[in-house]
Image: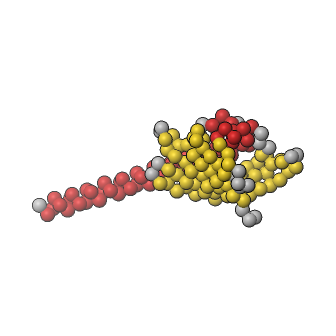
Amino acid sequence: MRMRRLMLVALLACVATLAAHAQANSDADTESKIIAMEHVWAEAFRTKDPSALARILDDGFVCVSSDGRLFTKAEILEDVKASDSLQLFMDSMVVRLHGDTAIITGIFRTTALEHGKPFARRERFVDTWLYRNEQWVSISSLVTRTGD
């Protein structure tokens, strides 16, 4: 009887280890997907492609820009069409998973034209993603300027 208990405990420990390993792999896959969608977002601005961005933004999406303005999904898609971004680099991205919600923080650097004049800007972002209907969609974004 004691031997059966030991075997049962050992079996349960193995199952728990496998489940934890599978969850870690799943989390890493999800983090990679979220980061990839952030790159889709940046590329959509660079190439002026609102349809690519429309697929990853929830219909109720809201964004607070670095100057405090509030944007809806429709306004962001219009902004993409008018974008004068020449380059957009993203780095320092960290994804934190909370069930069916993911929060990603990072920094992006933009070089673009504004009123015909070139500028460079470095900003920090916090984007919230929700897993809904078998896909990840962005539900909100907050952008702040960095001190650099």
Quadrant of the image containing the N terminus: bottom left
Horizontal and vertical percent for residue 29? 50, 48
Q: Nearer the viewer, residue 41 or 65?
A: 65
141 lies left or right of 110:
left
18 lies left or right of 60:
left
Horizontal and vertical percent for residue 9? 23, 60
Q: Residue at x 70, y 54 (%)?
A: 68
Q: Is residue 28 visible?
A: no
133 lies left or right of 38:
left
Q: Residue at x 40, y 51 (%)?
A: 22
Horizontal and vertical percent for residue 3? 15, 62
Residue at the outermost right position: 116
Q: Nearer the viewer, residue 80 or 46?
A: 80
Residue at the outermost top position: 51
Horizontal and vertical percent for residue 31? 53, 51
132 relative to 120, above or below:
above
Q: Is residue 84 visible?
A: yes
Q: Residue at x 36, y 53 (%)?
A: 19
Q: How is the image coloured?
A: secondary structure
Report the number of discs: 0
Quadrant of the image containing the C terminus: bottom right
Q: Residue at x 58, y 57 (%)?
A: 94
